[in-house]
Image (cartoon, rainbow, N blue to C red):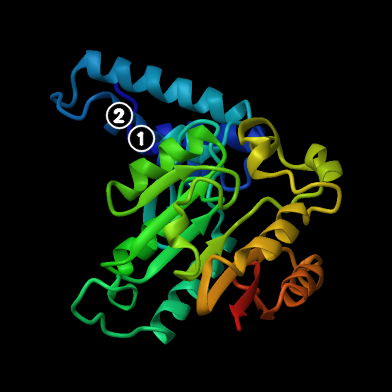
Amino acid sequence: MTIPEADRELIVARRLRAAGCVFAEDEARLLVAAADAGTRPDADAGTEADADADADALESMVADRVAGRPLEQILGWAEFAGRRIVVEPGVFVPRRRTELVLGQASAALVDDAAPVAEGDGPATRSPAVLELCCGAAAVATVLAAEHPGLDLWATDLDPAAVHCARRNLDGRGTVVRGDLFDGLPPSLRGRFRVIAANAPYVPTGAISSLPPEARLHESSLALDGGADGLDLHRRIAAEVGEWLAPGGTLVLETSERQAPDTQEALVAAGLRARVVRDDEVDGTVVVAVAR
């Protein structure tokens, strides 16, 4: 006998709640829907075989979630700024706080918007934008949709992230593997109007205290920021000036506690920098502009 969807959601929610999932009811609804859609998208609903396939798929996903695997990696997507971003196993899951990076990057593009003249010189090229340490390229993917015509680039050191980012951008930008700016063609130096980055900023000693979803299922390349969490921020500050266009903007995610030090590193590198905080998404960024 087929169990009604509402009852399945209730049963799953109870298991998830017992495992410590805070949003058990919401997660149960998503897992039940994913089991249905993933196991029989083209089959006739209601057959006994279909019901068994649904049950097997749902049990597998619930077991993964109870074991601590991130919900987004189980579903294969994360919601970010109202869009679904593909998330593959092992890839950093986009957080809501990074929507602040997106918002500030988008605002910088709007503030700096100018019509593109005809011709083939440097001044006539499409605006160049980079997502640094891109992970699944959530920021770049939304920018591609909201600002068509960008010369969009994304970089990451993790090959799994590069593969995932290419799926999300789907030909609307170029994704390269490299350590920060490594891998970018030299012709892009001095051309980026906006660089957005969620570089790792968790102190090495704090990795062990992260939730198991992050600690066990996301690459350390996306988390570990060195002894004080700011190794990557200092490297970006030292290198970003040669990649930004005059008046170009860097938007760099950080923590509220680390923001003053991140800002100081960017100012010391010759940029004008300010801290922006958004309590609604619990996000903090430093916005720096090339002189």
Q: How many residues crowd around disc 2 within 10 Å: few (fewer than 14), some, or many (20 or more)? A: some
Q: Are marks 2 and 1 in contact (CB under 8 Å)?
A: yes
Residue tagged by mark 2?
38
Amino acid marked by disc 2: Gly
Q: Position of residue 283 (x, y in %)?
A: 64, 67
| Side (left or right) of 173 relative to 117 | right
Q: What residue is rendered at 56% in x and 54% in y?
A: 95
Nearer-the-camera pick, 13 or 85: 85
**Image quadrant in which the N terminus is located:** top left
Nearer-the-camera pick, 24 or 235: 235
Q: What residue is rendered at 41% in x and 25% in y?
A: 58
Q: What residue is rendered at 75% in x and 42% in y?
A: 210
Q: What residue is rendered at 49% in x and 58% in y?
A: 131
Amino acid marked by disc 1: Ala
> From this viewpoint, is residue 77 visible?
no
User: In the picture shown, does residue 31 fall above or below 141?
Assistant: above
Q: Position of residue 255 (x, y in %)?
A: 73, 63
| Side (left or right) of 113 relative to 161 | left
Rendered image quadrant of residue 106: bottom left
Q: Secondary structure at mark 1?
A: helix
Rendered image quadrant of residue 211: top right
